[in-house]
Image: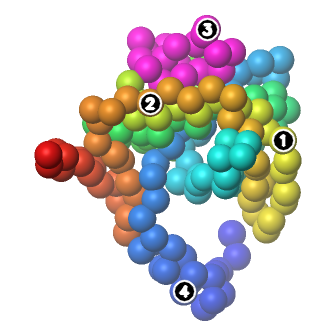
Amino acid sequence: MPELTPAQRDFRAAMANLSAAVNVVTTDGEHGLAGMTVSAACSVTDSPPTVLVCVNRSSRSHDVLVANGRICVNVLGAEQEDLAMHFAGATKVPTAQRFTEDCWDLDSEGVPVLRDAPASLVGRIIAERAQGSHSVMFVEVDKVMTREDSGALVYFQRRFHSLTAPPLSA
């Protein structure tokens, strides 16, 4: 791997200070079952409901996600750091084994949906654009599931952090 330029090092340092939600993006279909941990995902618009997901094109899951065309963005909760590590490839658990735990609904939506996720957004990739090393995918959402009683898992300064929401005051 070539050495990073000063601009690349500075950019990476700045991005380490950008807090990001942690998500596991999943797919299943004719081209196989796949999932990966992603922190570059955000809302685009609610008319129609659309999210943006950035995926490194060198990832093993990239081509499967694009080819299947239908994905689920599972927003991870405070207690799901282990899952984030599995799908980031840090635990060396093979892809097929990552989906054997009972926490996954593999049947209802045609793509794996994390049962206890604070939010799961199921939809289809309607546009994709290559930008540098990544693909920027626009996903039109057709199903949303949420859970109110969960904290959030965020990535900040190259580490996971758990956030809990304070109780709402009356």
Is residue 24 visible in this depiction of the protein?
yes
Q: Secondary structure at mark 4?
A: helix
Alpha carbon separation for disc pair 1 and 3: 23 Å
Q: Tell me, yes or no, if residue 82 can be seen here.
A: no
What residue sits right under mark 2 in the picture? Answer: 146
**x%, y% of residue 60?**
71, 40
**Mark 3 secondary-structure assignment:** loop
- Residue range of the region highlighted in magenta in the rendering: 99-115
Q: Nearer the viewer, mark 4 or mark 2?
A: 2
Q: Quick one: label 3, few (<14), some, or many (20+) residues within 10 Å?
A: few
> Disc 4 or disc 3, which is closer to the eye?
3
**Residue 95 versus residue 132 in the image, above or below:** above
Tell me the SS state at disc 2.
Answer: strand
- Single out the mark in the foreground, 2 or 1: 2
Q: Look at mark 1 in the image and give the residue it sits on.
A: 126
Tell which circle, 4 or 2, labels the residue nearer the N-terminal end: 4
4 or 1: tag closer to the N-terminus: 4
Residue 29: within the magenta?
A: no
